Amino acid sequence: MSERITSDDVAHVARLARLELTADQVETFTLQLGDVLEHARDVEGLDLADVEPTTHPYPLVNVLRPDDATETLSSAEALAAAPSAEDGRFRVPTILGEAP
Amino acid sequence: MKDPSVPDPTLPTALEIAASVRAGERSARQVLDDVLGAIDATESEIHAFNLVDTEGARAAADEIDRRVAAGEDPGPLAGVPVAIKDNLCTRGTATTCSSRILDGWIPPYDATVVRLLAQSGAVSVGKTNLDEFAMGSSTENSAFGATRNPRDTSKVPGGSSGGSAAAVAAGFAPLALGSDTGGSIRQPASLCGVVGVKPTYGLVSRYGLIAFASSLDQVGPLATNVADAAALLEVIAGHDPADATSIPQSAPSLLGELDRGVDGLRVGLVTELMGEGISADVATRVREAADALAAAGAEVEEVSVPAVTYALSAYYLIAPAEASSNLARFDGVRYGLRIDAETTNEMMVATRTAGFGDEVKRRIMLGTYALSAGYYDAFYGKAQKVRTLICRDFAAAYERFDVLLSPTSPSTAFALGEIADPLTMYLNDICTIPTNLAGHPAMSVPFGSGADSMPVGVQVMAPALGEATMFRVGAALETAARTAL
């Protein structure tokens, strides 16, 4: 595995995860995440070259259903919990700088 | 303080309640008013619930009584009060995951297990507290305050289903639903002295369970005793077309298995889960449990399952990776909290930063890192291979044994605030995580108490869909625990 996680890594990952961390949090998380990742190094001694990964406890195949129309949530129900909605759609602030 | 491993004998079991309500000997309303009285008396100390739905529960109980009076049978759990973990969707009733990001959200649909409970005649009393998004082992990570252990309110109830375990232990409801991703049903059951069951992955529908780690999450029962847990699992198990990971077969029959005994069953005591990191008093109780099974006719031997020692490492890469993806949906667009900002990206960052607690942020960060470019093979890919080794070692053990035995938790309940370091907290899950990675069933059964007089739980593990045998062993342990004490 790689070097111990740095505060720059933590700040970068926070941006990817859409989280804003204070300087104190970056410092704390760098130590805490580093400890967990260090603990995970115990698998380094294992020979895993010929081991297939397990993504799921059971062999999964596509699960299909008949293509029948059934009752589902109405548009009004689906939008009822939205912080902002308009004309049957979710409303969000500006994206990519176009006019609101 | 009463003996922590034996339920209060003055309280009726779920099966006793259902039998008497169906027979018209006891009203569902009276049963409900009794538990509401218990909640009134001590919930302010325990904080098991995020929400007690007094009005809704009374209406449901009255409807059960009306149906009994009309000669109808309301179902196998008629009039039984049930507490529901607050990460299961309840139509029209707030569902928060104990997170500010979902504070005030009202789901537009019921989880399948919630619907099945209502159809069985059970009466939902409310939504129980949890570690935010089920991430934790103490129920201290709730945005709405910690839950306390009813056996000793200076101690944690375990987690993440700490509210459900505390509700059952405190007599607030004889049954509760929890969810278990790395031990979140079994560990709090152990710490609170109740029975907790993680079923086989896919046996119980997860439709309406708010996802944490999708290859691991499973819904299951908590109860004061093994028979009640079996009755609840019979109700919630079975195929659900709304959950693509649901196993296409009908619910197992469990209640008929409980009296079959353990004569001739092969029981393996897992060596790797009995040594380092396990409190001596807990290990002693588990050895006594193994001896009790041997005395009841089981063949008991130690067995090595070497790869389980790597389970924690694999789990704390796989579960956060899946969580980082699952929790991407909380972005202030479709439901829950929104913190307004100039642009959508700024709004999402502000919302998630304000809405998630520190432990959830830590796991999202860990998962995002483990999945990020350049690290995927080193972390996530390797963890998935370790998962394969764990499955292989279990398969080898189950060629020789019907069930495996271990502690549920390495220690009895610890004090609130005692564990501040995340990695130390994660070590609470070393005995429970392996079965989640393998997708197998496991249950915790109270078996005596530790040096501090707090309950000890013994974990019974079984191969996939081995619930019937697992419950036989659980019932035998329960009998032995009550006889010995």
Image (tube, rainbow, N blue to C red):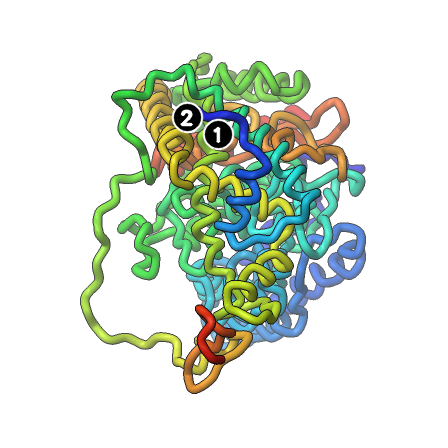
Direction from residue A27 to residue B401 in the image, left or right: left
Name the residue: 32% across, 24% down.
B392
Residue under label 1, please give it. B460
Q: Give the answer, above or below, for where B383 lies relative to A21.
A: above
Instruction: Find residue B225 and report its image quarter.
Output: top right
In front here: B20 or B191? B191
Whole-percent x, y for residue B343 in the image:
53, 69
Label 1 sits on a secondary structure element that is strand
**Numbered badge on residue B403:** 2
Q: Quadrant of the C terminus of chain B?
A: top right
Chain letter for the residue marked with disc 2 in the picture = B
Whole-percent x, y for residue B214 in the image:
41, 47
Q: Give the answer, above or below, for where A78 lies relative to B441.
A: below
In front here: B307 or B281? B307
Direction from residue B427 to residue B438 in the image, left or right: left
Chain letter for the residue marked with disc 1 in the picture = B
Q: Quadrant of the N terminus of chain B?
A: top right
Residue at the far left: name it.
A66
Name the residue: 39% across, 43% down.
B215
Point out the tag, 1 or 2, that comes first from the N-terminus.
2
Q: Amino acid at mark 1?
A: Val
Residue B174 makes an appearance in the image: no
Residue at the far bottom: name it.
A87
Direction from residue B79 to residue B205 in the image, left or right: left
In front here: B245 or B256? B245
Q: Are marks 1 and 2 in contact (CB under 8 Å)?
A: yes
Whole-percent x, y for residue B142 in the image:
66, 51
Q: Marks 1 and 2: same chain?
A: yes
